[in-house]
Amino acid sequence: MFLPENIASTLREVVKDAVERHTDVDPQIEDAFAAFRSTVTEEMLDDLVRAVVQEAVYARRSEVTYQSKRDAGAFGPPSRLKVASSPDVANVSRSILDTWSVAGRCLGDIKGSELASLADSEDKIGKGHLLNADLLRHLAKRVKGESKVRDCVRPSLVEAFLRRRGEQAA
């Protein structure tokens, strides 16, 4: 499970100290737990709960995607259905290669030489969307109601958040 850096660094320190103080695992766990719990702030608790919820959302999305692919036959044998040659029937039974859109293009029309660069582009876009979502959730704790972000948050707060996220990605 992913842990926000402020939690992970604190946890590493208390575990290191507990392991140095005790030789048996149970006292190490109890000592580390007590030490870590005494350092938990409201912000750390929010970050930890957000990380747990984020993992749960990702797991559920993965389950839904798997189920959709399974229902579409992605994990089973090819369909035995024969497609008639009439234009109406052919239109109704178009392939996923004709209906799936990637990077604004029909999947079936993408050339092999374009796949790697399109995959990199889609990956960067996805990471950018996830970063933006995390930033918005972070700001939602500070900006309430009809207030604007610029009226409630200093630019340095956003810069610090993005800097922390950049260090975590490295």
Image: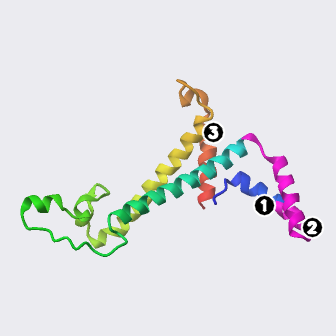
For image coordinates 13% across by 63% down, the residue present is 90
Residue 76: image location, x then y, percent: 35, 73
Seen as rendered, the residue at the extreme bottom is 77
Of pointers 2 and 1, the one earlier in the residue sequence: 1
Are circles 2 and 3 on residues that touch, CB within 8 Å? no
Q: CA distance from mark 2 to mark 3?
A: 42 Å
Residue 167: image location, x then y, percent: 63, 56
Q: Which residue is mark 2?
A: 22
Q: CA distance from mark 3 to mark 1?
A: 28 Å
Mark identifier at residue 156: 3
Mark 2 or 1, closer to the camera? 2
Residue type for callout 1: Arg
For residue 76: magenta?
Answer: no
Q: What number of labels is visible?
A: 3
Task: Determine crowd level at label 2: few under 14, some 14-19, many 20+ residues with C-alpha closer than 10 A.
Answer: few
Name the image quarter holding residue 13: bottom right
Seen as rendered, the residue at the extreme left is 86
Are circles 2 and 1 on residues that touch, CB within 8 Å? no
For image coordinates 84% across by 64% down, the residue present is 16
Q: Which residues are magenta?
A: 15-42
Residue 118: image location, x then y, percent: 35, 63
Q: Name the quadrant of the C terminus.
A: bottom right
